[in-house]
Amino acid sequence: MTQQTDNFNRIDDEVLASLGKWSPGYKIAVGVCALLVVVGIIAYSFQYRIGMGVTGLSVPISWATYITNFVFWIGIAHAGTLISAILFLFRTSWRNRINRAAEAMTVFAIMTAGLFPLIHLGRVWVFYWILPYFNWRHLWPNFKSPLVWDVIAVSTYFTISTLFFYLGLVPDLATARDRTQDGRRKKMYTILAMGWTGRYDQWRHYARAYLALAALVTPLVISVHSVVSWDFAMAVVRGWHTTIFAPYFVAGAIHSGLATVILLLIPLRKALNLERLFSRYAIEQMALLMIFTASIIGYAYCVEGFMSWYSADKFERQFNIFRAWGSWNYSPLFWAMITFNVVVPFTFFFKKLRTNLKYLFVACLLVQIGMWLERFVIIVVSLAHDYLPSTWAVYAPRTVEILVTGFSYGFFTGLFLVFVRLFPSVPMSEAKDDALPKEVEA
Amino acid sequence: MRISRRGFLQGIGVSFGGFGLMTLGYDRLVPYIHQPDELVPGVSTWYATSCRECPAGCGMVLRSRESRVVKCEGNPHHPVNRGRLCARGQAALHGLYDPDRIKGPLRRDSSGEFTAAKWDEAVSAVGAELKGKRIAFVTDLQTGSLASLTREWLAALGSDRLVTYEPIDYENIKTAAGGVVPSFNIAAADHLISFGADFLETWISPVEYARRFAEMRQIKNGKRARFVYVGPRMSMTAANADERIIVPPGAEAQVAEAFSPKWLGVAYDPLTPVAHKYGLDKRSLSRVSNEFIHAKAPLALPGGSAETARASMALNAPETSSEAKWRSPTGLADPGRPHAVTHISSRSEMTALTADMEAGKIDALVVFGANPVYSLPQSAGFKEALKHVKTVVSLSSYMDETTAQAHWVLPSSAPLETWGDYSPYPDTINLMQPVMGQLFDTKQTGDILIELAKASGVEPRSVFHAETFYDYLRRRWGIAIAPGEAQGAGSPEWESHVQIGGRWPGSGEAATPTTGYQTMGWSVEPIPSAVPAPPPTAPSDMSDRPDLSDISPRKGDIKLHAYPHIYFYDGRGANRRWLQEMPDPIIHGVWGTWAELHPRTASKLGVETNDLIDISRRGAAIRVPVYVTSGVAPDTVAVPIGEGHEEYGRYARGIGANVLPLLDTESPTVEITPAGESKWLTRIKGAISQNGRNIVQTTPLDKPFRREEEIALPLPAGYKWKDFYPGHEHAGHRWAMAIDLDKCIGCGACVTACYAENNLGVVGPDGIYRKREMSWIRIDRYVDWKSQSPILFQPMLCQHCDAAPCEPVCPVYASAHSEEGVNMQIYNRCVGTRYCANNCPYKVRRFNWFDYEWPSPMHYQLNPDVTVRSRGVMEKCTFCIQRIREAEIVAKHEGRKLKDGDIVPACAQTCPTGVFAFGDLMDPDSQVSKAFRDDPRAYQVLAELNTKTAVLYLKKIVEGS
């Protein structure tokens, strides 16, 4: 019994120690993020004032970097829920120490993603016309439009995953409240902990609610990215109009999400001295999961190629050939995408590689690039080679788009960095649950 | 701070008052206090006048709304153009509303800069300077009253030095056809060969000839007249030919000679050396020759060099060979009805004038309309000669290169602001009237001349028998001018002339002939008795016999073929931004100049498309990007005329390069050196090949036309097993359009008409580079050099699909279906997701990337019936919904139903060949209904997408398969 308490204390100590002082390096990292955010906001204000023309968009290619970013960030948002909800339902124990970080990542990624449809809107000042709200003219949005589905799906996902995230945080907030000395922080934790005392009935409600939300959020993981994929699959554009898009996008989303979690955890466990809690084992498990998602993506790539041949549709065939070999602008991106998304994760079959954190870090970075390129290739290259050859064009992002993309990285990373210094980034209660001797649990 | 109740109310009052005052700065709608007669707000008034954008002299009617002219259309009664206009005619409005027009008289001060002057002081100063001096007058082509006034004016000032100067002077034809430019009855020909004459684009009277060409090409008894083009380049006219013979510039003459019937029965085949020399297919050459010679009504159009014109005119009136019994002359080239371009002075007159100026024999030069500093070759030395003239007076409306050299600028009003007349043919006289008030402090050219005469001591009444040009004009039209008669009053016959836009055979009962008209003995200006001799500059190394010795350039020499640009003509259209934004039909180049090179020539020079080259000749040089195309003869560089202005205005200045300074002779030999750098040749992006997608479909002439696929009707009846949703129910009408690809010549008049009608933004070269052109209708062109018809044109506009892909994807219903079948875009509902544009397979939707600008006074041209879109919204073709509504209102007022043909969209209205048919698909007798139901050539673009387009295309008819 004493050993157990020691262990509990040790978890609390280690986790709460990570909320300590910011090292200069950490401050610089947050400062860089803040700079990216400020520059991005200035760039966007310019776009707002002058018009969408400051981007590189054109009429055949009227979606590009912004929508790529949207799909990219939404994709990243998936791993968090997968780890915290789906793996929770499957009682996968290694997720118990990393799920907080993954959930935080989810919430911040949706916040980032949600900005992009607005950034890309021609008249953002009337964006609320897409929302179904009561008005005296009885003007409703067009529920046939996948964009309306998108709004509903993303906002639902954001709401549920935020609730889920917050609910899991409550017991830890109470611990932090009880053990922190700093007055202002104590006040903040007190308010946020909402009077959690750890009574039996509170734990009982908590467990029920957690389970219910986990069950609720699980289908959302599947549905949100399916709906996002329908933005494309419902259109007539070749390269978009494919029934495989929903599973393909969901797998891709989880793929990129897992890569992001690994990418964040590897430096984080060092910076916060949480190497024991963010175990190598959990990271390795995620790497193994990525092999699975990479195979689904690889399969989807093959199916796309096969279907274009099997359909005997000249537009489809020409498009696929163009995408792979047709253009010096785009074909390298296509091959980079296949290499980074499928070939690189397949090296995780080797235990030596997947347990080498440095290698894993680089590999996950490549997967990130690959997944961004995948969305870019789907969106831009399909639009670049549409039905009428007379309208074919080429797209390249311009400064404003690059700066706004930089903003999204700064915004996301900055939020995450600040979060892990303010709130327990390891779910202490669940980690303790993990630390219980098996007999007690039984 | 404590606020009392009183203080609070005071504050509220002051702030509300402040808000009230703030609104003072805003534009308001103010009703008329005294409403002018005949002016009903919202109702258009139409004024007839003449187009003066080129010497063709088309009749024009201008639509005026609330006293501002907003649209040009062809005068439906006019015999030249029958209601149609070309792109340049449509853009005449930009001549009127040019923001760079000269806004008042200018004088050059001691520092060499222009300073504003007042009319009376300017006129008296210039009048004094002209008095007793040796004056020369350079004008563009004028006929009728202004020409006669100019001559009388010069005579009164003691001079007769009038040079009617046009860079495109048709001297080759005049030389070949006995001093006149005949009219060509293309419609009656059954075999047409054009020897370098681009009669569908720029040659003499393009709108008229395009219409005649469409008439000629109609199929009669399963056959149709053949058209063969012989020339140095694949021009738009060549693209419309059944067969092309591409030879270096100047060599058309040898082909024409070899086609002559005089070789019939002679034991010599002139085709063999020609075919051998230019690498042509001997068999097809002799087939063309045979067909032409044995046609019932063959017609050869003389273009190209003087020798080409001579040889081709000889084909129209062949010498009868003693042995071969041959048909009598067809009379299709009628010198008895000469075109106005006959009156252009010969080149030697301009050369002589320049020499006299150089020698100091000219004290004062008055320039009107012409721009010789821009258009004369550098070797002519006009600009230098101008420095020897003490007083140079420009009457131009625009600050062109010549005007920029003037000492005095007395700006004329734009042609649309003036009274006048112009006579394209002896029997056709257009009457011009001011279609709106003066925009700037300008005067009519005639009035300036009369005032100048007065200022230099001439009594106008005794010389011109009139005090104003208006009176002068009316006197010449046989209208009695009573002394002291109020200006503006007129006799009924005068008013009927004004109303109808002039007089011509059958100009209507409204225009009753007046005695004065006849007694004045006025047909046109008498043709100058001294027919200009062949100019000394014309190549004279040709004998009567076909000179088959090597006149082609020596190895390595490259010949320059400079051709008038379809939209800028000789350069005068360059400051019309609609025209700058119009893609050239073949290259799709915009906002610039290029050099077309044959792939072989290009590889010899080591250049590719977009590489810059220097083309030089005798000290004059231009630097232009290359466009490599098989559509130009080897060892030839083809460069369009019209760009490269140093002055003229914001849209022309510094764009492209001016090739005219190099042209000291016809198709001179030039040196080409690669500049070693590249610059993207501004052109509409997109692939040129159809990639086997069968978008522009063709059908062979010799096989029965057959519908291959069922047409998916854009009506509920068109919804079959393929559809998930049922069709739209339509309320009374379902608007639809049929486009006959066989008639489309690719001229782009429809595109400019759409810009004018629908307030389309102009994006400039950067916008084109970023693929953001705003055209609601565009002419797609596809190239396949292996095909019998290598270049295919296709007008592409919103297809108004019944199952439109753009509609379901809009989250806010901004893209919606109207109950009359029109695919609407509701601008003020649009939030700008651009999803509709992605999902449109035809890519006809246009996004407002910026707030596009209309610099003053261009905004006067905006059509008040059409919303000006703000940035962030999507837009596209509306089928000219404003015209549909107008026709509906008119029909309702007249208490009748709409009938087929009541509604004519702007594109259909202006099309010179009548490509478009617009109407109601629910009216079974309408033209479009018949086309949808019966036409065997009908097809829908991208029919496999099952979009049920309401725009039907009729396949182009081609020879062979």
Image (cartoon, rainbow, N blue to C red):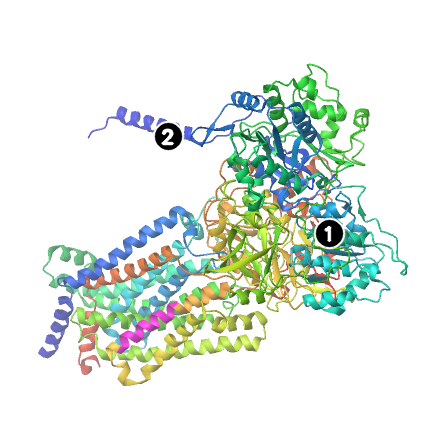
The image shows residue A418, relative to residue A86, as above or below, that is above
Q: Quadrant of residue B343?
A: top right
Report which residue position mark 1 lands on. Answer: B309
Q: Residues within 10 Å of mark 1 (few under 14, many from 20)?
A: many
- Give coordinates of residue B34: x percent, y percent: 58, 21
| CB under 8 Å between discs 2 and 1 | no
Q: Is residue B220 magenta?
A: no
**Which percent across, then down, holds residue A85?**
32, 71
Residue type at mark 2? Phe
Could you say whether the residue bearing mark 1 is in a helix, strand or loop? helix
Q: Is residue A361 magenta?
A: yes
The chain letter for the residue carrying disc 1 is B
Residue A93 is at least partly visible in this image: no
The reply, left or right, for residue B419 in relation to residue B844 is right
Q: Residue at x 39, y 57 (%)?
A: A398
Q: Where is mark 2, residue-wise?
A: B19
| Residue B164 versus residue A100 in the image, above or below | above
Would residue B514 appear left or right of A128 to someone viewing this image?
Answer: right
**Which of the image's four quarters has the C terminus of chain A?**
bottom left
